[in-house]
Amino acid sequence: MKDITIIGGGPAGLFASFYSGLRDMSVQIIEFQDKLGGKMHVYPEKIIWDIGGVPPKPSYEIIEDIVAQGLHFSPDVHLNERVINIEKFEEHHFVVTTASGASFHSKAVIIAVGGGIIQPLTLEIEGATRYEVTNLQYVVQSVQKYKDKKLVISGAGNAALDWAVTLAPHAKSVVLCYRKDEISGHEHMKEELARLGVIEKKRTVITQLMADATGQRIEKVELTQGDTTEVIAVDEVIISHGFNRDASLLDQATIQLERYDDFYIQGQGNASSSVAGIFACGDIVKHPAKVHLIASAFNDAANAANLAKQYIEPTARENGRVSSHNERFKEKNKQVLQNYL
Ligand SMILES: Cc1cc2nc3c(=O)[nH]c(=O)nc-3n(C[C@H](O)[C@H](O)[C@H](O)COP(=O)(O)OP(=O)(O)OC[C@H]3O[C@@H](n4cnc5c(N)ncnc54)[C@H](O)[C@@H]3O)c2cc1C
């Protein structure tokens, strides 16, 4: 039995893990994806500006820092586990069950599931998955990877257009193909694509991926527009067809929480929920003062850990001691200070 089960290993869950550790609580994090970091993995190459005091840098660098902090107090981490139920057996005893049949017991639960489980819509071409480890991507990891490469981007949504515009100045060539007649409502974007020399192919879909001699990489793609097909050489293929979102956990869980808009957990301005012992933080929470930002997830997470601490131990302090005055960092600070000597 752990003190806290945290469902979701995004920014909110990870800071809740750190703050729970700071408050001497044992933690287990349950995360569906095969890695921690939450939906920041959807936009790893984007530059983040709006985390207070953090200089602008790519999302993937911020993920590394957030994950390191979340693991600081050595929580148990269970990846590739989709939580399908939350039950309250009795006061101070919750059971969280996953699709694999595993169950996790704890005295309190922090829900940090963001907008649910997000997975890219994949290319429905037989055998496509084998190229995912080489040159077929659903998310742009870094601009560098595409430098001087011949790219095909499939999709007409904001992300596809953003990637075309971001990568075009660095790539050798960019072909943007999409099923629609037109990329509607993006006048400025259309001008930008033309200015950057992006070759637009309307009403066109990828119908075949052709491997090189090793069979490991895509060498050519077949594009089809109506009855016409053409084959073009590529170095990298990027598919941006949107995301599937599974947010069914809170609809189906035994424990029913008060919701907002049939989706969010109704918050009170802090991280409490309508069930004692269950707390919520990050994007899944809604209240009048809530801002759906990474920075706001941190605030929620500290609230969630503080409330959980008091739920488990009613005589505990309301808040954790700030880190600069916190005894538990005394020894660690000596190591950190070495960097400044
Ligand atoms: C394209 C894009 C750009 C953004 N840019 C910025 C920005 O510049 N600045 C900013 O501050 N914010 C930005 N955001 C918002 C920011 O990413 C979110 O506010 C933040 O990620 C919320 O963190 P979270 O931990 O609440 O949720 P998430 O990051 O969504 O993490 C939730 C985690 O819970 C897991 N999970 C969900 N359901 C289950 C389940 N049933 N079982 C197990 N695990 C589950 C998910 O797999 C996920 O890992 C952006 C968002 C997007 C989509």
Image (spheres, grey):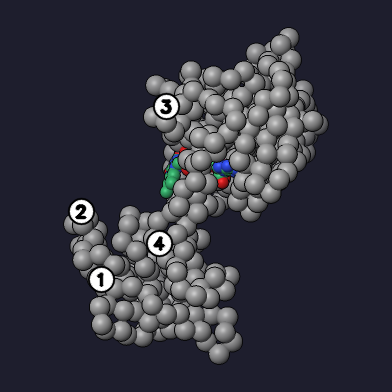
Give the CA distance from mark 2 to mark 4: 18 Å
**Residue 163 vertical placement versus 68 (above, below):** below
Which residue corresponds to mark 2? 185
Which residue corresponds to mark 3? 260
Amino acid type at image mark 4:
Ser
Q: Position of residue 96 (x, y in %)?
A: 67, 35
Which residue corresponds to mark 4? 240
Q: Secondary structure at mark 1?
A: loop
Give the CA distance from mark 3 to mark 4: 30 Å
Give the CA distance from mark 2 to mark 1: 17 Å
Which residue corresponds to mark 1? 203
Going from N to C along the chain, the mark reached first, 3 or 4, is: 4
At horizontal 30% and vertical 67% (from top left) the residue drawn is: 178
Label 2 close to label 4 by CB (< 8 Å) = no
At horizontal 61% and vertical 24% (from top left) the residue drawn is: 278
Amino acid type at image mark 3:
Tyr
Q: Residues within 10 Å of mark 1 (few under 14, many from 20)?
A: some
Q: Secondary structure at mark 4?
A: loop
Going from N to C along the chain, the mark reached first, 2 or 1, is: 2
Give the CA distance from mark 4 to mark 1: 15 Å
**Residue 304 vertical placement versus 136 (above, below):** above
Amino acid type at image mark 1:
Arg
**Nearest to viewer (mark 2 / mark 1):** 1
Amino acid type at image mark 2:
Gly
Give the CA distance from mark 3 to mark 2: 31 Å
At horizontal 44% and vertical 68% (from top left) the residue drawn is: 123
Tell me if 241 is positioned left or right of 193 in this view: right
At horizontal 74% and vertical 15% (from top left) the residue drawn is: 313
Going from N to C along the chain, the mark reached first, 4 or 1, is: 1
**Nearest to viewer (mark 4 / mark 1):** 1
